[in-house]
Image (spheres, helix red, strand yellow):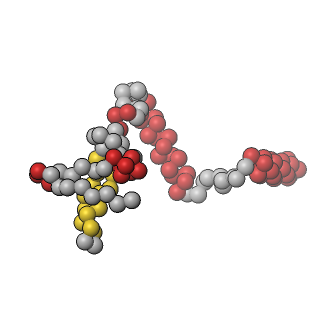
């Protein structure tokens, strides 16, 4: 459905209610204007208010942060060296692989014990 509206003083344009509703726009929302192929395009912009998300600032002492950073560095080194387990699509696959590893380790241990 096309709707025509008039450009007001200082270039202001009223976006018709039906179009705003279809776009999910409401008072205070941000939109971006661009000119593409002879048309003015209005694109809704999503702004994330990071203050509404929790963070760990102030929750850890400097010593705790050093420990955490050290463990993360070790984990990164393991990943880079390929010391990671494969991903499993379900618990059954994981259990089968775990059982296979246990059997392999038992066989290796019994060979060492036999020597």
Q: Residue furthest bottom?
A: 37
Residue 25 picture location, percent across and down: 35, 46
At horizontal 28% and vertical 40% (from top left) the residue drawn is 28
- Looking at this view, name the residue that lies furthest to the right: 114
Q: How many marks?
A: 0
Q: Is residue 95 left or right of residue 3?
A: right
Q: Residue at x 66, y 53 (%)?
A: 87
**Residue 34 or 51: which is nearer the viewer?**
34
Image quadrant in which the N terminus is located? bottom left
Question: In terms of image quadrants, where is residue 2?
Answer: bottom left
Q: Is residue 37 visible?
A: yes
Q: Is residue 70 left or right of residue 12?
A: right
Q: Residue at the spot x=17%, y=55% of the render? A: 7
Position of residue 42 measured from the top left corner of the image (x, y, whole percent): 29, 57
Position above or below: 59 against 17 = above
Residue 109 in the image: state x and y as whole percent.
82, 48
Residue 45 appears anywhere in the view: no
Residue at image position (37%, 49%) is: 18
Picture coordinates of residue 81 (x, y %)?
55, 57
């Amino acid at each position: 459905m096309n709707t025509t509206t008039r450009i007001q003083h200082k270039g202001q344009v009223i976006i018709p209610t039906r179009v705003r509703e279809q776009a999910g726009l409401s008072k205070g929302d941000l939109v971006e204007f661009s000119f593409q192929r002879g048309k003015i395009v209005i694109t809704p912009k999503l702004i994330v208010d990071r203050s509404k998300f929790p963070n760990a600032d102030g929750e850890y002492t400097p010593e705790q942060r050093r420990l955490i950073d050290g463990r993360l560095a070790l984990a990164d080194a393991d990943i880079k060296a390929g010391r990671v387990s494969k991903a499993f699509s379900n618990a059954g696959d994981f259990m089968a692989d775990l059982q296979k590893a246990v059997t392999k380790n038992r066989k290796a241990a019994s060979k060492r014990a036999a020597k």
